[in-house]
Amino acid sequence: MLRQAWRWSAFRDTRAGTARSAAASFLAADGPRRSSAGPTRGFEDIPHSLRGRSQLLQQPQSVSASYLRYPWGHEAFEKAKKEDKPIFLSVGYSTCHWCHVMERESFKDEEIGKILSDNFVCIKLDREERPDVDKVYMTFVQATSGGGGWPMSVWLTPDLRPFIGGTYFPPRDQGRRPGFKTVLMRIIEQWQNNRATLESSGEKIIDALKKGTTITANPGESPPLAPDVANRCFQQLVHSYEEEYGGFKDAPKFPSPVNLMFLMSYWSMNCSTSEGVEALQMALHTLRMMALGGIHDHIAQGFHRYSTDSSWHVPHFEKMLYDQAQLAVAYISAFQVSGEQFYADVAKDILLYVSRDLSDKSGGFYSAEDADSVPAPGGLEKREGAFCVWTASEVRELLPDVVEGAVGAATLADVFMHHYGVKEQGNVAAEQDPHGELQGKNVLIVRYSAELTAAHFGITVEKFNELMTSARGRMAEVRQIRPRPHLDTKMLASWNGLMLSAFARVGAVLGNEVLLERAVQAGNFLKEHLWDPHQQNMLRSCYGGDQMEVQQISPPICGFLDDYAFVVCGLLDLYEATFQTEWLRWAEELQARQDALFWDNQGGGYFCSEPSDAAVLLRLKEDQDGAEPSANSVSASNLLRLSHYTGKQEWLQKSQQLLAAFSDRLTSIPIALPEMVRALMAQHYTLKQIVICGQKEASDTAGLLAAVNSLFSPFKVVMHTDGNPESFLCQRLPALSSMTQLDGAATAYVCQDLTCSLPVTEPQELRRLLLDGATAQEAL
């Protein structure tokens, strides 16, 4: 008899394999299961004109599939109730590898399509558009299987209670592993003969999840002690750290920017201790090895999703906006810490890619580029990485020039192939290429330093750098004429908020006006296209149309917690980079709206979605900083920063209540919430208030701001006043009116715990003051 919740293996969207079913008592035998350590991706393939816009489908669709499917909504729910059929819910998103596989193998299969259409109401959902729905059913799948991923396949009762869940299924049985057709037939049989048990099981599981996922603070509870939590988080990261190539744990290896930002922040508060030095070394080594590895696109810039091996060599080739945003911030932070231009160059490299390939003319940013593409024009079968990889013969044909003065009359190809590890037979190991898609191909990875390669060929480092710049330029031109991977032109408020932070922070550190102007364009885009001024709501998404116009669905999807939190953070970063108070004013408005929609008045913290949608069965609080930081983690910092900008003590109290609500998690497994640990540290050490008095556009004001931005000081707010008592900030912080310029020069004050330093007017004085303050703060 069918168990009410089959235990499916954790599915990881890696090239190395697919999910294995551990079908317990119903299927023939258990198989080994791999745990899911992070987010994975996948989605059913849909026509190009609809990609990234699945919610635009207002009528049931059968295009590119052999079954009738509906969008998530009232029509599908009513049909299931009327026809008394279970619901098959397929969840993923546009730029997926394994969901493309399942689409091709199962959803386009005529026999399977007929079974689906005749016996189920089929719903297709983009998890990026409806993260609230995805989170509910992923929680169910993880609870009943020990892991999860996408494509996610869940069967529901007509009242939306899940009773069976899994991830990828092959179309037909493979040994003891059940195929999708077998799964469907057994669910049909159980629905007909054992329905009451299935429904009861679904109800019990949801009830248990409601209790098990509750995150709440006890009355009067305080947040845990920050130094203890931070030390525990550091030790847990040390335990999982891989010393040779950096990163955490073995393959597949993810960038994990939240870990790297925590480590640099931990160092900033412990820079004179061995633990602090080790934390910084871990972060810088990981960032360097990623930048040298194949996960970094050395020709067209940007970073791929993750590495399938421990050396960052062979990636899953998908590129995600949220990765680019967080990594750009991590690399520019590493530049602030170390002073090494290498890290600044990588940050600029990332933003070059985003500006060129993920930017809409409206100012918004697209979500992702797919991993798969056809190898050549006119090709039919997509292959992973086809757009990015090279054969040795391609490189030799493209770079035939003899390098003047090089040892052995070496060609440009010889130098390039030596430096980037290009081999005649290809450089991808068979175990990293289970489907043979990369046979004979090369994934570029830096194998030697510039100095070593230059010495090997008897040329200067300057000459070598010129040669590599030229070679990469030629190869980029060839890449541009290859068939491109699918571009997901969906624009999400949350991810645009992350990227707004990236452009603002990198632009501020580098004093780059082009990057800062791009950040302002992104802020304007968010306000014009993803803010409803009438309803006073953020919108979740909008879409790049076929003519590259911005499109919206009707009705639009209202924003979720992460949309508000990430945009508020981006606006605060944009204000600190430009001193344009319109962004600070909007951040204050958005935070108030976020509080009204999502705050838990009983237990503290924010729910991921507001309670008005009865179709969302669980009200959850995200308790993990994963591929993206938890919106509660970001909100804890936002509230603290805003309390300093506005003087509103209730926001300081909310931040403390939020941290108290997550106290158990922070105390026991802080490695799950490194971004929230940073917020806890900010609470403990208190934020510095750096006030710059001067004319906003004046060069001496810019000089003081540049001094602030030259240092990595994670726990601060920067504000500007021109002496006008009617200004936005002076109205909220009257004490600013008493801070004046010395002898007409731009002047900086550094304040903390209601005490301010003597004013300074020289950038070097300000820099010295901030460095001395950091040393004093470490001693606390």
Image (cartoon, grey):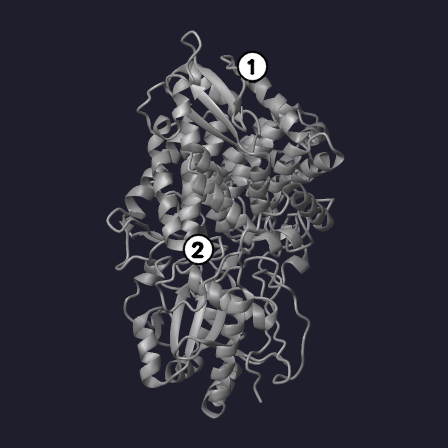
User: Residue 670 placed where, x, y %?
Assistant: 63, 50
Q: Quadrant of the N terminus?
A: bottom right
Label 2: which secondary element: loop
Q: In this view, does 343 lie to the left or right of 93?
A: right
User: At label 1, which amino acid type do we have?
Assistant: Glu
User: Residue 551 placed where, x, y %?
Assistant: 28, 52
User: Residue 408 placed where, x, y %?
Assistant: 70, 30
Q: What residue would you read off at disc 1? A: 765
Residue 145 or residue 120, whichever sits in front: 145
Q: Is residue 413 left or right of residue 646?
A: right
Res 447 quadrant in image = top right
Inter-mark Cα distance, 1 to 2 = 45 Å
Q: In the image as oriented, which residue stretches furthest toward the front?
A: 220
Disc 1 and disc 2 in contact, CB within 8 angstroms: no
Residue 276 or residue 507, whichever sits in front: 276
Q: In the image as oriented, which residue stretches furthest toward the left?
A: 534
